[in-house]
């Protein structure tokens, strides 16, 4: 095997810093970042096309990340959100994945990261995932999601206004060019 990748180095550093983090919002960001890094790491390949990290190592990192996530869950009140089944990663066999959630009319393009409903001594296994259990989000995470959903909706509304203005200006310029051509003739 080759040396450790930059993603794995960053993942290890963040994992070692997480237990010392007291700020809950930063800790939630750590967990989200760790999960993204684990997904990236599980997809990395060596030049020979083999997985850079073994399934056992991915599972070990996953357990450590979920231990940090359970620290958050045990310290804050939680809000329930509907659950979706876990997806199985073809490279690692057990890394967390992102799945599309059913499209809602207010946020047609949002995606949600799937996390276990209870992290207490729960090992990740896609075959054992129970889709009937709800996912728990604390109030800070829910507020963060709501904030970003509102920002996305506002941005979409602004883009619609800008597109309308662009269309009107294009039509005005086109009309002006046509009028100029008629005057020349």
Image: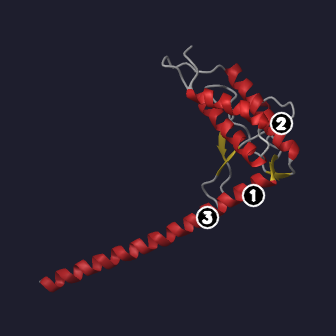
Nearest to viewer (mark 1 / mark 2):
1
Looking at the rendering, which quadrant does residue 164 occupy?
A: bottom left
Is 49 drawn above or below residue 132 in the view shown?
Answer: above
Please tell me whether mark 1 sits on a helix, a strand or a loop.
helix
Nearest to viewer (mark 1 / mark 3):
1
Q: How is the image coloured?
A: secondary structure
**Quadrant (top left/top right/bottom left/bottom right) for the C terminus:** bottom left
The x, y position of residue 143, in whole percent, is 75, 58
Q: Are marks 1 and 3 in contact (CB under 8 Å)?
A: no
The x, y position of residue 9, in whole percent, is 62, 27
Circle 2 crowding by C-alpha within 10 Å: few under 14, some 14–19, many from 20: some
* Residue designated by label 3: 153
* Residue designated by label 2: 119
What's the CA distance linking mark 3 and mark 2? 32 Å
What's the CA distance linking mark 1 and mark 2? 21 Å
Circle 3 crowding by C-alpha within 10 Å: few under 14, some 14–19, many from 20: some
What residue is at 62 percent from the left and 31 percent from the top? 10
Res. 143 mark: 1
The x, y position of residue 83, in whole percent, is 77, 46
**139 with respect to 179 (left or right):** right
Please tell me whether mark 3 sits on a helix, a strand or a loop.
helix
Looking at the rendering, which quadrant does residue 71 occupy?
A: top right
Please tell me whether mark 2 sits on a helix, a strand or a loop.
loop
**97 with respect to 129 (left or right):** left
The x, y position of residue 182, in whole percent, is 17, 84
N-term mark: 1 or 2: 2
């Amino acid at each position: 095997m080759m040396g450790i990748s930059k993603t794995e180095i960053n993942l290890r550093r963040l994992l070692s810093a997480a237990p010392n983090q007291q700020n809950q919002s930063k800790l939630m960001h750590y967990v989200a970042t760790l999960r993204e890094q684990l997904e990236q790491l599980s997809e990395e390949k060596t030049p020979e096309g083999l997985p850079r990290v073994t399934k056992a190592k991915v599972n070990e990192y996953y357990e450590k990340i979920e231990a940090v996530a359970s620290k958050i869950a045990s310290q804050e009140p939680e809000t329930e959100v509907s659950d979706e089944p876990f997806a199985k990663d073809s490279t690692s066999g057990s890394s967390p994945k992102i799945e599309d959630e059913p499209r809602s009319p207010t946020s047609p393009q949002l995606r949600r990261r799937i996390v276990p409903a209870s992290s207490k001594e729960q090992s990740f296994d896609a075959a054992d995932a129970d889709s009937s259990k709800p996912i728990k989000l604390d109030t800070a995470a829910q507020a963060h999601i709501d904030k970003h959903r509102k920002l996305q909706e506002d941005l979409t509304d602004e883009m619609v206004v800008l597109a309308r203005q662009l269309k009107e200006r294009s039509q005005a310029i086109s009309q002006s060019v046509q009028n100029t051509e008629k005057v020349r003739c």
